[in-house]
Amino acid sequence: MMSAFEKIDYTRFDVWAAVVMEGVAVVETPHRVACHSWLRQQGYTIASIDFAQGVGPAVVALGELFHWEEQFGYRLTAEKRNLNALRDGFEFDLQAGQGHVLEMLNAEVAHQEDPDWFGGLLSITHEHFLCQLAVGARFFGMLILDRGSPLVGVGYEMLSVPVPFWSAPNHENPFAAGRPGT
């Protein structure tokens, strides 16, 4: 399997976004254009979602970005913004070595309107980052914020001790010989 990064160099924005920021990074508004240029030079593609008009129009844009109707047979609408559904369709289909950034503009608007939904979007972004990193692809979310934004420092996910691993019916030993994955 190919690793996502050739080496861990914390002076690189993408490494910092992945290793230190765990898949959700922030770029100051005045540095957006230069950041886009750098990302493209590094082989990243960029998709932008703008929350300036609120969560509803951004949800519709996410539906278009993820080809929602082709995947699920219905349109993702402002009224249908269930986070579990969004989690199911949140896919950029990257291959090992590819890089993609989901840029979020005017995130403060989304957070003000629906902080739980926006926090859920950040959690889904974090989860997708981990999945892509596991297969050698580079994905992260990028918020464009002004210095001193009230969003800086806002929590969106909390980890805890997980349940024990199991995959066998009737809670049998998942590591027993002959089981899938052993």
Image (cartoon, rainbow, N blue to C red):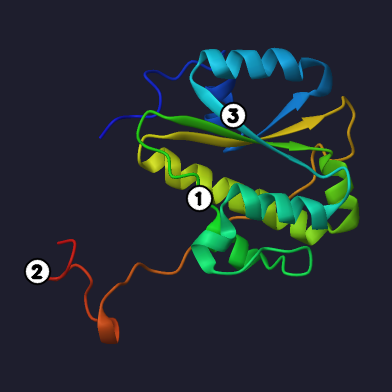
Where does residue 46 sit, x and y in percent of width and height?
A: 60, 30
**Quarter of the image with the C terminus in it:** bottom left
Dot 3 surroundings within 10 Å: few (below 14), some, or many (20 or more)? some
- Residue at the (43%, 45%) spot, across then down: 93
Q: Secondary structure at mark 3?
A: helix
Quick one: 59 or 126, which is closer to the camera?
A: 59
Residue drawn at x 50%, y 16% as measured from the top left: 42
**Residue 7: where, in percent of width, then height?**
39, 18
Please state the horizontal and vertical placement of residue 32, each as a whole percent of the image.
75, 20
Q: Do labels 3 and 1 touch, CB within 8 Å?
A: no
Question: Which residue was labeled with disc 1?
Answer: 91
Task: Write down the residue under mark 3.
Answer: 17
Q: Which residue is mark 2?
A: 177
**Is 63 placed left or right of 163 in the picture?**
right
Please give the label number shown on residue 141: none
CA gap between label 3 and label 1 equals: 19 Å
Regarding residue 160, the answer to whether it shows in the image is no
Q: Is residue 157 left or right of residue 168?
A: right
Compared with 30, 178 (above or below) is below
| Front residue (pair 109, 178) | 109
Q: Quadrant of residue 180?
A: bottom left
> Label 1 sits on what residue type?
Glu
What distance separates the C-alpha of mark 1 from that of mark 2?
A: 34 Å
What amino acid type should be assigned to the residue bearing mark 2? Ala
Q: Residue farthest to the bottom?
A: 170
Q: Residue furthest left?
A: 178
In primary-sequence order, the first of circles 3 and 1 is 3
